[in-house]
Image (cartoon, helix red, strand yellow):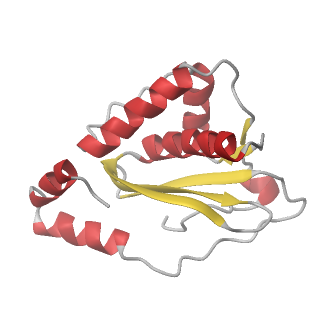
Amino acid sequence: MQSKTDREWYKKLSSKEKKTYRDFYNKKNQKIPKVKKPIPVGIAVDASAVPNPGFVEFRAVDIQSGKILFNTQIGFSSNNVGEYCAIVQAIIYCENIGKRLTIWTDSRCALAWIKNKKTKSKVKSCPDATALLKECEMYVSKMKHIPRVKFWDKKLYGEIPAEYGRK
């Protein structure tokens, strides 16, 4: 659900931008792509921005079961910000369930941001996305150990299971 500041931001959009926003968020029955063998174990994360920068959402999928663990809409931002927030939210998810799982991403940029504990986004995001990004950056800066976050090689495994398929 959007906050008051996000709704105010939405009201300022042109009618074409509002249509893109509605079309993007009203998609249903999204398919989770199949993974080639051998299947890695852990959580796959991905983000989608339509257009980029645009309306961003991200999700995490349990690779073995295909179950969507979370799907979050953050408003206007960049795909890289969505990928980064997805990784951080997956780290928090793992801590909450008490398991140390490998998190897989197909974003080299977000992976570098995690390892460097610093983002480099210059995109002007909506207030909710900016607030979430700041929370994620603060969380990562306080981490003593970088969890197992690995790059998902599409040539080896096929599309990442969390893929939205909106390219």
Q: Nearer the viewer, residue 47 or 91?
A: 91
Displayed quadrant of residue 116: top right
Q: Residue at x 39, y 39 (%)?
A: 132
Residue 166 location, x and y as percent?
48, 67
**Residue 34 seen from this side:** yes
Depth check: give the residue in front, 126 or 49. Answer: 126
Residue at 21% of width from left, 52% of height from top? Answer: 6
Instruction: Say which quarter of the image contains residue 65.
Output: bottom right
Judged left or right of residue 3, residue 26 is right
Looking at the rendering, in which quadrant would you find the N terminus?
A: bottom left
Q: Position of residue 151 (x, y in %)?
A: 71, 41
> Left or right: 143 with respect to 39?
left
Q: Position of residue 23 (x, y in %)?
A: 31, 74
Instruction: Give the residue drawn at x 18%, y 52%.
Output: 4
In this rendering, the answer to whether 152 lies above or below 39 is above
Residue 160 seen anywhere in this rendered image of the structure = no
| Up/down of 159 relative to 95, above or below | below
The image position of residue 94, as x and y in percent, is 68, 44
In the displayed structure, would residue 46 be above or below residue 91?
A: below
Residue situated furthest right in the rendering: 38
Residue 143, located in which quarter of the rendered image? top right
Image point 81% across, 54% down: which residue? 156
User: Which residue is situated farthest in the bottom direction here?
Assistant: 29
Left or right: where does residue 98 sit relative to residue 16?
A: right
Q: How many tags in the picture?
A: 0
